[in-house]
Image (cartoon, helix red, strand yellow):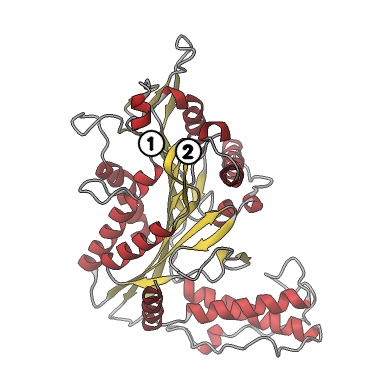
Amino acid sequence: MAGASVKVAVRVRPFSARESSRQAKCVIQMQGNTTCITNPKLPKDATKHFTFDYSYWSHTSVKDPNFASQRRVYQDIGEEMLAHAFEGYNVCILAYGQTGAGKSYTMMGRQEPGQRGIIPQLCEDLFARVTREGSPELSFSVEVSYLEIYCERVRDLLNPKSRGGLRVREHPLLGPYVQDLSRLAVASFADIADLMDSGNKARTVAATNMNETSSRSHAVFTIVFSQRRRDPLSDLTTEKVSRISLVDLAGSERADASGAKGIRLKEGANINKSLTTLGKVISALAEATSKKKKPDFIPYRDSVLTWLLKENLGGNSRTAMIAALSPADSNYEETLSTLRYADRTKQIRCHAVINEDPNARLIRELREEVTRLRELLSAQGEGLGGAPHIETPSTPGLSDTTLSAPPATTSPTLNGGPGLEPPLGPTEAMERLQETEKIIAELNETWEEKLRRTEALRLER
């Protein structure tokens, strides 16, 4: 599965009430997987053609034989990504497009029959398959988190006490992550639907010319899906852990088109900063693929959004993008921009691997790092009074010898050895030590403890 391209689809929606009242003309045509767009001001100019994995015609009604329903979009993209998750891969589905183009409808949808989006359909199918395939030898666990990136600040949508400002960090072993983000245990589709509903109600929305309830934030709904299989002959247990990232990006449009002013205009600047950075990342990765060489520099850390999506863009993930299109002639420039964005994205190649037994290896490496950090602090003459030591139980299937760090062969230096570049000072080393021990404790948390924590947060909501 390594070296697979990002799967890209585009979907055109019906005219909005505003567009219909203005007698808008449709500038989009689709045939098979090809999408065409015509400049309404220069109709004699050559029509521009783009080819994608899927071109979804949702401009008309279900009576049209070419109409792409919510179910069809999910069956083409959602079912494939869920199958990859069961295989043990990380997966990601991104929805991109201008405000009001249909991103949130495609991802979340509505409650009416046949109107649910990719996220609720995927969650329901996940639990249906878990119920169908569970056995004494095969068990599953599901945890979810839901965050919002608003004006470059991260907010936990599942924690009522979260007011934004959660810290994004990058650990040498874990990669980018959000510190103190809730990860709640769920046992059924009803549980996950309740959390989705709570998170959606907490999202930041505001009216613009483009959309009366415009999503002013990027939303990332993440499912951590674990599968544990016990071999009855050897009594050994193996585990696969998949991360399913479902992303509804904020609207992309020019300030003059959205009619934004004051606070809304500042919001737009932050939204455009993250989407511009996303565009730079996509362009750099696409260029590297076309030249078949490793890119010199990818600006992942220039925005919170791209930093957190680092693995999903050219890394360890199976990724799909759905670009939402407005059919109206008044939105020609934004729609053309979206098509070009999607066209670049399909050139990116990701390098996914099956995540088998990641926790056992991760806990061992984290504990090795704890040992190195303690040696580093001792060599620097720093006491450890401010760093609470957390004793962690051995991971099933691993001996104490496996989990302990190898004996140090040289005296620790300010560089701290492998995994501690750039050099750490005493304050940074102490902070890293405390955070690493906290991560180890979270990784060793039992399922019962996770359920109790989830229930406590539910009661607070």
Mark 1 or mark 2: whose residue is earlier in sequence: 1
In the rendered image, the vertical position of residue 315 relative to residue 138, given as above or below:
above
Q: Is residue 42 left or right of residue 109?
A: right
Near-viewer residue (276 or 141): 276
Q: Quadrant of residue 138?
A: bottom left
- Image position of 48 (left or right of 81): right
Q: Is residue 192 visible?
A: yes
Q: Residue at x 46, y 58 (%)?
A: 353
Residue found at x 39% / y 79% = 456
Q: Position of residue 180 (x, y in %)?
A: 54, 71
Name the side, left or right, on which 135 lies relative to 108. Answer: left
Marks 1 and 2 sit apart, C-alpha to C-alpha, by 9 Å
User: Which residue has dot 2 on it?
Assistant: 346
Q: Considering only vertical position in the picture, is 280 above or below 49?
A: below
* Residue type, numbered disc 2: Lys
Q: Provide residue 188's location: percent of width, then percent of height.
A: 27, 68
Residue bearing the label numbered 1:
53
Residue 170 found in image quarter? bottom right
Residue 104 picture location, percent across and down: 39, 46
Residue 37, compared with residue 285, is above or below; it is above
Residue 181: x, y in percent?
A: 51, 68
Marks 1/2 in contact by CB < 8 Å: the verdict is: yes
Secondary structure at badge 1 equals loop
